[in-house]
Structures are given as C-alpha cells and as structure tokens.
C-alpha cells in the first residue's frame, strides 16, 4: 500500500484529471514529469533509464523528496525509496558564521544543508590523541556538542545517519576550525535526508501519470512529462 505525504486541506477538491486505465509505454516512460492540477503544491518526478527515480515535493514552506528505484508491477509504476549515502563537506569560513562561540571545553559540529538544519545525524568527534565521542544532532539547530578535556585537539569528524551501521564519512579538521572548536558540515545531496513516502504507486492516465492512491491529495493532479 502506498503512503504519500499529508498535504494541506486546501489542495483537495480540484477536479480529477482523466485517469482512464492505460498501458505504459516503457520506451517513452523515462524522463522528467511535473505535477499539474493541485493547488499550492509543486512536485517533480524524474524516471531514469537505469531504473532509478528522484521525487521532489514542495508545499508551503516545506520541501520533501525521495530517491530510489522504479519498476512496473501489475500495470502500476511502483516507486521504492532506497537510502543513498549522505555526502558531507566542511563549510568554508565565508559560508559559516557561528551564532555564538562554544562554551569553554566544548566542541560543536553543525550539520545542515544550504538552508535547513539536519536531525538524525550521528557525529563522532575524534581528537589527535585518538579519543572519540559520539553524539546525535539536536533537531532544533542541527548541533552536536561534546565536552573534551583541556589539551585535546580536534583532528577529524565522522558523520552518518543516526541508529545505523553505515560507514562513517570522515572529514579532517583544518587547524583554524580545530582552534575555534566549532565547524559546520554541509550535506551536498539534500535529497538523501528526505523521506517523502514509504512507497508510491502511479497509473498511466490519458495525460500522464496519476497517483493510484485516491485518498492522497496528489491523486487530484497529473504528472505530465516535459517534452
């Protein structure tokens, strides 16, 4: 059973497009699709020839998405998310301005995209001595904070999704950031942190792709292919 995002009630009530049951043209199916017919909602779906997809959704001030694999099952286009590795980089001094200096003895890592703070990120602080401490980010501000003994020097930082056994992505700390005891780590592939749906099924309509779950507000519209 597909699960699609809960959208504002204002998007419901639009006239449904003609969603007569049709067969998919597998040769023409890959490409970019844009949602039409749903008020105050923007959405794009990319279907790759390699069987992968990317899905983006914007409503109000919220952005969400997914990426994974697509396949045809029982005349339905099934989208199944697959978690891709998160890829971080250290923000430059021009990009990052600390809101406040760390408290004495504290090291602070800020995990973010270009415009939002990240939750559910596990941060491993490692000192030059080899001492390491692991802490999760604060959902409110994307910060992970640890207290380290005087004399310890911040050498590198490992990042990964919280609660997983994913491999750490290690980033070395430049001397100036280690001395300041605060640094920001930017996620370069923001869609890897999004979870718009558990699964989604679409059917072929007269004008494009239609979300099969009629209880979803997205089913009020149609994904039309960009030509």
Image (cartoon, rainbow, N blue to C red):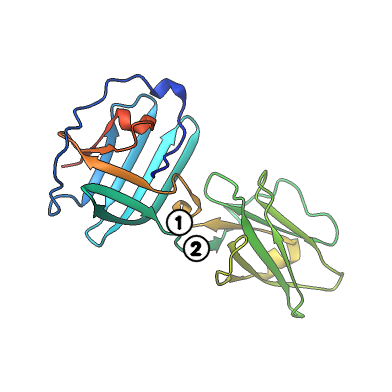
- The residue where tag 1 is placed is 189
Horizontally, residue 24 falls left or right of residue 152, namely left
Q: CA distance from mark 2 to mark 1?
A: 6 Å
- Along the line of sight, the residue nearer the viewer: 140 or 200: 200
Q: Residue at x 75, y 66 (%)?
A: 179
- Along the line of sight, the residue nearer the viewer: 77 or 114: 77
For disc 2, the neighbor class at 10 Å (few under 14, some 14 to 19, many from 20) is: some
Q: Residue at x 87, y 70 (%)?
A: 150
The extreme bottom residue here reads: 129
Horizontally, residue 149 falls left or right of residue 111, namely right
* Marks 2,1: beta carbons within 8 A: yes
- The residue where tag 2 is placed is 87
Q: Residue at x 69, y 52 (%)?
A: 143
Residue 78 at x, y percent in the picture: 30, 50
Compared with 45, 129 (above or below) is: below
Q: Quadrant of residue 1?
A: top left
Residue 158 at x, y percent in the picture: 62, 69
Residue 183 at x, y percent in the picture: 66, 59
For disc 1, the neighbor class at 10 Å (few under 14, some 14 to 19, many from 20) is: some
Q: Quadrant of the C terminus?
A: top left
Helix, strand or loop status at disc 1: loop
Horizontally, residue 6 falls left or right of residue 133, namely left
Helix, strand or loop status at disc 2: loop
Q: Quadrant of residue 200?
A: top left
Compared with 146, 78 (above or below) is: above
Q: Residue at x 58, y 53 (%)?
A: 94
Residue 142 at x, y percent in the picture: 65, 50
Q: Earlier in the sequence, mark 2 or mark 1?
A: 2
């Amino acid at each position: 059973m597909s699960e699609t995002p809960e959208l504002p009630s204002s998007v419901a009530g639009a006239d449904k497009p003609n969603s007569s049951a049709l067969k998919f043209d597998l040769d023409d199916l890959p490409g970019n699709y844009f949602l039409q017919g749903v008020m105050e909602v923007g959405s794009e779906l990319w279907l790759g020839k390699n069987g992968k997809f990317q899905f983006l959704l914007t409503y109000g001030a919220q952005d969400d998405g997914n990426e994974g694999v697509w396949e045809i099952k029982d005349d339905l286009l099934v989208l199944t998310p697959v978690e891709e590795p998160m890829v971080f980089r250290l923000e430059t001094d021009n990009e990052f301005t600390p809101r406040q200096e760390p408290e004495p003895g504290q090291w602070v890592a800020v995990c973010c995209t270009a415009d939002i703070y990240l939750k559910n990120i596990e941060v491993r602080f490692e000192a030059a001595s080899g001492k390491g401490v692991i802490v999760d980010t604060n959902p409110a501000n994307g910060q992970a904070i640890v207290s380290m003994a005087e004399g310890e020097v911040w050498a590198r930082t490992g990042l990964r999704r919280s609660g997983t056994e994913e491999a750490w992505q290690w980033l070395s700390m430049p001397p100036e950031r280690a001395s300041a005891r605060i640094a920001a780590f930017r996620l370069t592939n923001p869609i890897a942190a999004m979870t718009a749906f558990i699964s989604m099924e679409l059917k072929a309509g007269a004008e494009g792709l239609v979300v099969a779950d009629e209880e979803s507000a997205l089913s009020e519209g149609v994904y039309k292919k960009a030509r």
